[in-house]
Amino acid sequence: MNFRLGVDVGGTFTDLLLVDESSGQTYTAKVPSTPQDSSIGVLDGVNRICSDSDIDLTKVSQVMHGTTVATNAVLTGKGARVGLITTKGYRQVLQVARSFCPGGLGGWVSYIKAPLLAPLELTIEADERMDAQGNTVSALNEKNFKKDLKTLLDKNEIEALTICFINSYVNGAHEIRAREIAQEILGEIPISISSEVVPEMQEYERTETTVVNSYVRPQVSKYVNNLQSSLQEIMGNDVNLAILRSDGGLASGRAAAESPVNLLLSGPAGGVAGAMYFCRRGGFEDILTFDMGGTSTDVALIQNGEARVKRETRVGDVTVRAPAVDVRTVGAGGGSIAFVPELTKALRVGPESAGAEPGPAAYKKGGDKATVCDANVVLGYLPSDVKLGGAMQIDRDSSVAVVQNLADAMDIDLMAAAEGIIKIVNESMLGALRLVSVEQGYDPRDFALVGFGGAGPLHANSLGILTGAWPVIVPPGPGVLCAYGDATTEVRDEASQTYVKKVEDINLDEFLSELESLKTRASISFAKDGISEERQKVAYQADIRYAGQAFQLSLGISTDDLRENGLQVLTTEFDRQHEQLFTFAHGKDHEIVMLRAVVKAKNEGMADIQMAEDGASIADAVIQETKFYFEGEWYDATIFDRNKIGIGTEIPGPAIVQEMDSTTVILPKHEAKVDSVGNLLINPSN
Amino acid sequence: MTAKIIETNNTPFERVDVDTVTVDIIENALRNVREEMDAVLFRTAMSPGIREQGDCFPMVANREGKMVVGQFGSFIHGFLDAYDDEIKEGDIILTNDPYMCNAAVSHLPDWIILVPVFKDGRHLAWTAMFGHMSDNGGMVPGSIPIKAETIYQEGIRIPPTKLYKNGVLQEDILELILHNVRTSEWNRFDLNALVASCRTAAKRCIEIADRFGDEVFDTTMQIMLERNLQAMTAIINMIVPEEPAYFEDFICDDGVGKGPYKIACKMWREGTAERPLAIFDFSGTDPQAKSSINFYMNEEMFKMFFGSFTINLVDPQILFNDGFYDLVDVRIPQGSLLKPNFPAALSGRTHALGRIFDVMGGVLGQGAPDAMNAAGFSDSPHLFYSGYDKKGEWFQLFQIGFGGIPGRPIGDGPDGHSLWPGFTNVPNEFIEAYFPLRIVKYEPIVDSGGAGLHRGGNGLSVAYEFLAEGQIAIHDERWLTYPWGVNGGEPGMRSTKKLVRQDGSEEWLPAKCEGIDVMEGDILYFNTWGGGGWGDPFAREPGLVEHDYLRGLVSANGANRYGVVLNDKGKIDEDATEILRSKMKQERGDVELFNFGGTIEEIKARSVEETHLEPPVTP
């Protein structure tokens, strides 16, 4: 009997999920996170889950882990001291940062530029030049380079080194040579070169991406190595550690430590992967996910069971070229603060958040500003007199007091103000959902909406009404969904190459052999980690656009189709999608700008996870009666315990379904049903 | 209004009660509409100007043509006055002629698309967007001829014209227009993108009205305008004094030998606290130029500049709009640089447009010096490079220059950045892949930012090595007058352009020139200017000066401007610094509010020695 363990480290809690691979039986645990060294929390949790479930630790063969170590290093500015080597004339490539000042007209007045991740005082230039076709204009001046490198090293500050030369995306020879020299001089200090990390056009983006890789690398590799050896100590030497990438695939601990720039959105990707797991099994392949936490909400679109992957990852102010599930974030969460500016008397919600400290007023930890959570308490969606599991005590009077302040400022009554806050925050989330759907040419009504995260199930029904995306799905364990995602996703890696050729100038055979070599590159890490070729599944993509356009679409490539019908397979499909998105197509001047091979390997042999049980009567699940406020009226509602609701049970709204870390609201004229997987499916009543 | 809007449903819109929350939600939805307009345009446009540099501006206006969301204010009022025809559902209007739309766009390369939005036969709103086209025909590639003396020389003039009638593209007209420009395919695509963007916005307006009700939508737009009126009433009372404040700044030259041109502005407040009136009077501004540097300034656009710089003070999330226009009166003398007589040439208006922001900062700042910024990178200088590459194909590059953001109350100015919203540089690797150019150097110029408690941002030095024979044109500014410093801050360094020929000979190019032949191997050093400094440089923490030195942003000599002495290891010499600072403080005396680097006469007298160029003749 083998077990696998999913572990997700969040800001407040570390969630663990232990799955019996043969039966699909699960055990969960939630322990406090330990931000100073998150591996401590992970190991605490491992011990807890195994003692709770009475399972022998050595039976755990795989640990799958979503981590925010890389993300936090960037967000807190506590990454490595990175040295940078640029082409002569480009030392300040990060300082200029494409000259962009955010904000509207006058945005420059208040813009403060964040410190560079590779400081200028640790940046030197190398005398070398490649042209845009990959021909050497001038070779690397090795003598000067060695001298400058030694001076840089003598500062005794550098913990990681990045090399990024102009036009190295076409030909990385100078970077490779520079690395050879640097390795001799720098010894153990890890070196990242841009032509390997991200061989894509655009010097600023490529430099920044490679620098970020260096910036998080020492921390990530230390963390992964420590965790790996601690796990081996308690689980035996054959335990495998895998880390969730931003694109929703898994990487071995080894691969993750080498390219940590691919882990920046590991957290949100876990939630999306978890939602996909339960929805796919429930028969839903097209979904919009909606993960609402304390300070922000992440949304994503999944079509045909595949999450859209974008080529760009953004964390705080930092944007890098690395594949990530296309998650859009809005600064609206349960802790978002509502306020009324004096002059305009408008009601504004967020982006300021009360965070965990002082938190919403309802938690009585010193919060004195009205938050979205307080509005939910006032309206009765978060019942103040029910306490389950580890949930915090809720004080309705405190919430009423702070919401009343806003109501007075706007000269409206308390309940209208509370509903106003909820409506405005729902509208912000609708904005994010529109970004991933309507604005990409998708109709949300063709999708199901999946709500999870601490606050998602509270707002999911309302967002179903706003988007028309039915059913609204609340998967099992909406507060620990990331851990499910970690445990159920597949191994993934990819390789890409800037190509930049007009389609009419492309030779098909050469094109196909380019794809083949990308496949070889993408599967290097699989070979190193001992994943056989039979288990690998490759998919090819081309990024294509009209020559000169900034917009590009990633189209899947079938090599058989290409051999049979030629490259027009791609151009026809591009025209079709362009027309769908933007109401017009150009029909000529197609240009392929990037090729990519994505290799995946399924995790072998795991039974489906079992959640809800059959047969219990709905009456057994009743906790108590309550009332809540909706669209100007009070409704009587029943509170149910989700753990006692069996498969097939129907729950008519108005109702509230409680579980340890989450509360689902079922609005009047709606009803929920538990499907065979344990998902709550909410639909309008007939 | 001479234009007639034809509605098939004449039910009038009635004002209804709308609760605050609904207003806020619709406001949010309209904000999303505007962002989606930009997103659609950026993704579908083709020319690097729009695509990478973001030289384009969206708007949604209410039925009356008042901008509810957008950036540069509405021109629809002026357009409707000038347009003598019927407008029906399905029509889409195109124009580029400043003289025909009350300067809604201020030169011909900006093409503007206007879509009337109808719902159930009633006229509901307007959506509009303009974008800078790569070429508009006329005398020179890029269509910004310096030497043009009339607008007829600046390429095709498109009066307000129905590009679509009844939903049908007027192909004859489109082909006629595109036949007159050098980059017809880029323009065709960019125009498509503008239309797609406005149509998307129109669709969204209809969806919002569907969701909340047509009258609610219409009333809400009215309420949003009123919110701005309310907010700006308070702001004007707060920051515009009753006692007049005066400021003047200059355009260095007109490219044909005259300059500097003065832009003068006097500001004061009249009226009551409930209904104040802020007056901006540009009397004293120099007469229009013979060349194309005139900036035909739409009065409402200036109001918008004024409002957008100040409204953030009270509600940063407000959607800025036209609602406060009655509170501002802008007076511009006819026949001046800012309101030239038809048919004066206008294409090179960029410099005066940018300089307006320095003027506004200077006039507003006198009442609240601590909140005032120094003079910034108030322009978007251009380089044009065109010719035939080695394959015999025509190429035409339009590059915008970036420079030093000024020292500001909040801190140092960023180096080599843009003052324009959304502008970014075109990646050099992109340029090298698509044009016969190599960009040998791309870096901030050491010491070019004005010294101050908060340092001005450094200008940018870009070295272009030409790889094919061709011609270049340059449009630049602040080569003669200085980007001024404030509150004791020093002026920033001025701009220069040096052409180094392959044979090693050098020549200093004037700030505005065109038709310059270049050969393979020639290198142009295009150096933009730095931002002015803010506050007393001798009060700057010496550690910050040392840090700037280590970062290559300030030299050891440049550190002396802060009274900071660095030893040969680049470390602060504390004793020497103390001595130098007290000596320099004494020599300087009291801190002055503005530091212009001398009077115009003094600057002119030093011109040849300092800039290698003859001073222009006073206009």
Image (cartoon, rainbow, N blue to C red):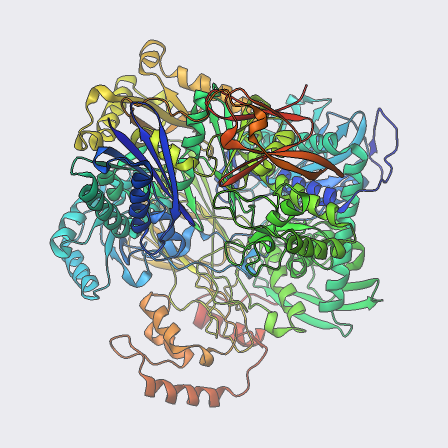
Number of numbered tags placed on the structure image? 0
The quarter of the picture where the C terminus of chain B appears is bottom right
Question: Is any part of residue B260 visible from this angle?
Answer: no
The quarter of the picture where the N terminus of chain B appears is top right
Seen in the picture, residue B318 relative to A479 is either above or below; the reply is: below
Seen in the picture, residue B575 relative to A459 is either above or below; the reply is: below
Residue A422 rendering spot, x and y as whole percentages = 65, 43
Residue B281 rendering spot, x and y as whole percentages = 75, 64
Q: Residue furthest left?
A: A184
The front one of A60 and B333 is A60
Question: From the viewer's perspective, is A513 left or right of A385?
Answer: left
Question: Is any part of residue A420 visible from this angle?
Answer: yes
Question: From the viewer's perspective, is A391 left or right of A605?
Answer: right
- Residue B127 figure quarter: top right
The front one of A291 and B485 is A291
Residue A450 rendering spot, x and y as whole percentages = 52, 30
- Residue B293 figure quarter: bottom right
Seen in the picture, residue B383 relative to A503 is either above or below; the reply is: below
Residue B441 rendering spot, x and y as whole percentages = 34, 54
The front one of A78 and A116 is A78
Seen in the picture, residue A266 relative to B290 is either above or below; the reply is: above
Question: From the viewer's perspective, is B22 left or right of B515?
Answer: right
Q: Residue furthest front?
A: A620
The front one of B216 and B161 is B216
- Identify the residue shown where x is 47% and y is 53%: B401
